[in-house]
Image (tube, rainbow, N blue to C red):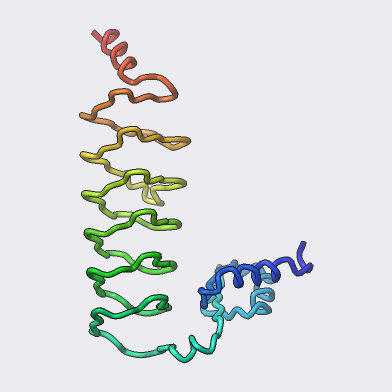
């Protein structure tokens, strides 16, 4: 279907649907020559390239936005209190060691950011979405997880295991997952089933055979 204008039409439809987004990023393989020509035709510019991948960006220029654009400014150690920053955008900024306290940042959209070694305390994350993240080495303590879903996760290249300690997982379901070498110790397994088989009954039979 290449060369029929389908891709161009789809990108235009997406931009029209999400008009609030003024900066679009994408990545592609360095070997996809046709992709490079297509993205440039659609107004994307190269911001990074290596032997394996190219990174492109497209900025939607709007008059009112250009007037409010703050660019290449050194604003470190600044403090903002009781400010209205609704619908503001931060692109390629350095916010290292910044603090957000007692603030409303509902519907925040964060992507392609380095948030390593950050701390989140007393935060309302209800109905938030997390995708394509690296949470290796992170710690979750005193967290309410009602209704949370974990899908398509991995342990990374180093295969560091996950630890659940003193957690309430009652009524939870695990589907199509790799549970090799898992250990369950000192846990309430009342009603727990594996493939429809009650674990309590299995342990009861095992203990009878063992004795």
In the rendered image of this protein, does residue 17 appear above or below residue 128? below
The front one of 134 and 21 is: 21
Left or right: 3 as drawn, with respect to 75: right
Location of the N terminus (image quadrant): bottom right
Q: Is residue 193 left or right of residue 30?
A: left
Location of residue 67 in the rendering, given as x and y in whole percent from the top left corner: 46, 91
Q: What residue sits 31% from the left and 46% below the top?
A: 145
* Quadrant of residue 79 within the rendered picture: bottom left
Q: Is residue 87 left or right of residue 11?
A: left
The C terminus sits in image quarter = top left
Residue 39's x, y, as percent?
64, 75
Does residue 176 sit above or below 107 in this rendering?
above
Residue 181 position, x and y percent, is: 35, 33
Q: Nearer the viewer, residue 51 or 142?
A: 142
Residue, x 21% and y 39% (percent of image)? 166
Residue 110, image x, y percentages: 41, 67
Rendered residue at 27%/8% (across/down): 208
Which residue occupies 27% across, 70% down?
A: 103
């Amino acid at each position: 279907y290449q060369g029929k204008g389908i891709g161009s039409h789809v990108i235009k439809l997406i931009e029209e649907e999400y008009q609030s987004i003024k900066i679009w990023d994408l990545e592609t393989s360095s070997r996809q020559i046709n992709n490079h020509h297509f993205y440039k035709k659609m107004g994307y510019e190269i911001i990074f390239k290596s032997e394996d991948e190219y990174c492109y960006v497209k900025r939607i220029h709007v008059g009112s936005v250009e007037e409010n654009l703050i660019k290449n400014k050194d604003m470190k150690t600044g403090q903002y209190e009781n400010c209205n920053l609704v619908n503001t955008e931060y692109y390629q900024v350095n916010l290292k060691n910044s603090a957000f306290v007692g603030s409303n940042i509902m519907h925040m959209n964060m992507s392609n950011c380095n948030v390593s070694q950050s701390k989140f305390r007393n935060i309302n994350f209800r109905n938030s979405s997390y995708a394509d993240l690296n949470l290796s080495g992170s710690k979750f303590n005193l967290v309410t997880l009602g209704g949370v879903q974990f899908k398509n996760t991995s342990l990374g290249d180093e295969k560091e295991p996950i630890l659940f300690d003193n957690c309430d997982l009652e009524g939870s379901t695990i589907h199509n997952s790799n549970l090799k070498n898992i250990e369950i110790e000192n846990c309430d397994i009342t009603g727990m089933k594996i493939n429809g088989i009650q674990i309590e009954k299995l342990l009861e039979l095992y203990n009878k055979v063992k004795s």
